[in-house]
Image: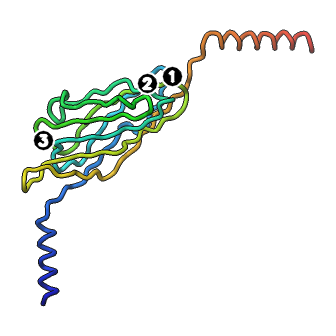
Amino acid sequence: MKRLIALLLLVAALAFAPHAEAFSLSLEPPSQTIAVGDTATFALRVTDLADPILFYTLDVLFDASVLAFQGAIFTNALGNPSDSMVDTSLVDTGLLGLVGTSATGSLTGDFDLAYLTFSGITAGTSDLIIGSNTFFGIDPNTGGDIPLNVDSLFDSRATVVNAVPEPGTLILLGAGLTGLAVWRRRHP
């Protein structure tokens, strides 16, 4: 009898416990190829959000020897875009911090949180990784803050290729080919 009562109490506690539903966070598109000097923009996408966001912090990691951070445009999905900011204090090391609050705390579903723009500085490949993050929402029972669970993190990739040759390189190539043609004519 004691086991039955304990089991019923456990089921009741789990049924009425506050819970936070998981949502997904991703950078879209999954990959881009750009030339040195060109820019690539990625949307920071939230999907399947059931509990509204009140406050968030997250990091985006990238290879600072391949990409340079150019800027972020925050959408008005959570209210006033000026309530969000970029921490660029470590951007030279490849760490970009994003912090924001929601003006209304009422948005759920799928939406773009921000658009991040990078430029290619050398040929190579850089993964964009959503690093440590914290999201808080509204507890429907108490009205207080509760942590929201991110279901899965997706990485994106930016590949910088097709470095534009400098004019001096083209002149050297042309001179080498001309010399090869002259040598070939003299030595049949």
Tell me the crowding category of disc 1: few under 14, some 14 to 19, or many 20 or more residues within 10 angstroms, Cα based: many
The residue type indicated by label 1 comes to Val
Sequence-earlier tag: 2 or 1: 1
Q: How far apart are marks 2 and 1 (CA)?
A: 8 Å
Q: Residue 105 carries which label?
A: 3
The residue type indicated by label 2 comes to Ser
At mark 1, the secondary structure is: loop
To which residue does mark 2 refer? 119
Query: In the picture, residue 8 is in which quadrant?
Result: bottom left
Q: Residue lying at the far front in this picture: please name it.
A: 89
Residue 50, position as x, y percentages in the image: 18, 50
To which residue does mark 1 refer? 36
At mark 2, the secondary structure is: strand
Q: How far apart are marks 3 and 2 (CA)?
A: 33 Å
Q: Which mark is residue 64?
A: none
Mark 2–mark 1 CB contact (< 8 Å): no
**Which of these two is toward me, 165 or 147?**
147
The residue type indicated by label 3 comes to Gly
Sequence-earlier tag: 1 or 3: 1
Tell me the crowding category of disc 3: few under 14, some 14 to 19, or many 20 or more residues within 10 angstroms, Cα based: some
At mark 3, the secondary structure is: loop
Q: Closer to us: mark 1 or mark 3? A: 3
- The quadrant the C terminus occupies is top right
The vertical placement of 9 against 28, above or below, is: below
Residue sitting at 35 percent across and 29 percent down? 88
| 102 left or right, relative to 176 | left
